[in-house]
Amino acid sequence: MATVDITGEQFASTIEGNDIVLVDFWAEWCGPCRQFAPTYSAVSEKHPDVVFAKVDTEAEQQLAAEAGISSIPTLMAFREKVLVFSQPGALAAPQLEQVIDAVKALDMEEVHAHVARSQAEAAAAAGNGSKSSGPQDGSQIPDF
């Protein structure tokens, strides 16, 4: 599958409507982004079961801010609507393949249980005035 450019309006529906979505946050002026683009595109052709999305951070500044993008390129991976990987920096093809293999190999029952526990802990902490520590979106899943 080729890469697809998505906007802020398409972001949520892309994540919600597909099992595995990789998102490359990039900008035209970014040298490492331009170097990573052919790798991202070539690897996308090998994985028709994965959506390879691209977000232009210049055109989609609000989405980039909401996603917490502070360095580009940044690659995010979502599986079953859960952010399971987020890392700035261009990857070589073998590294990108490792990320994809790891995302495909995740035990999603375990991931969803982890997210549910984290959300319950955050709700309990909010109930007694404590602040939650860390994101509750699944991004605390162990690194690959």
Image: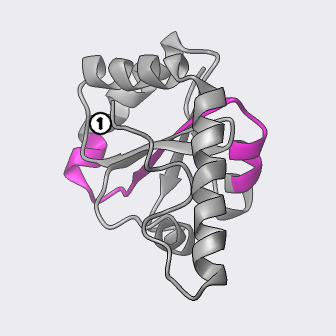
Instruction: Identify which residue is drawn at 24% across, 38% down.
Output: 35
Given residues 47 and 20, the one toward you in this image is: 20
Q: Amino acid at mark 1?
A: Phe
Q: Residues within 10 Å of mark 1 (few under 14, many from 20)?
A: some
Q: In which quadrant is the N terminus drawn?
A: top right
7 sits to left or right of 24: right
Using the image, determine if residue 125 lies above or below residue 1: below
- Per the image, is 36 magenta? no
Given residues 39 and 111, the one toward you in this image is: 111
Instruction: Identify which residue is drawn at 40% across, 29% down.
Output: 40
Give the image quarter of residue 20: top right
Using the image, determine if residue 81 lies above or below residue 70: above
- Per the image, is 25 magenta? yes
Q: In which quadrant is the C terminus drawn?
A: top left
Q: Is residue 66 visible?
A: yes
Instruction: Identify the element where label 1 is drawn.
Output: helix
33 sits to left or right of 22: left
Tell me where the magenta segment starts and ends, as one range: 12-34
75 sits to left or right of 35: right
Q: Which residue is mark 1?
A: 36
Extreme bottom residue here? 129
Q: Position of residue 116 (x, y in %)?
A: 66, 50
35 sits to left or right of 55: left
Q: Position of residue 86 (x, y in %)?
A: 40, 47
Q: Position of residue 55 (x, y in %)?
A: 51, 53
Given residues 32 and 64, the one toward you in this image is: 64
Instruction: Identify which residue is drawn at 34% across, 25% down.
Output: 96
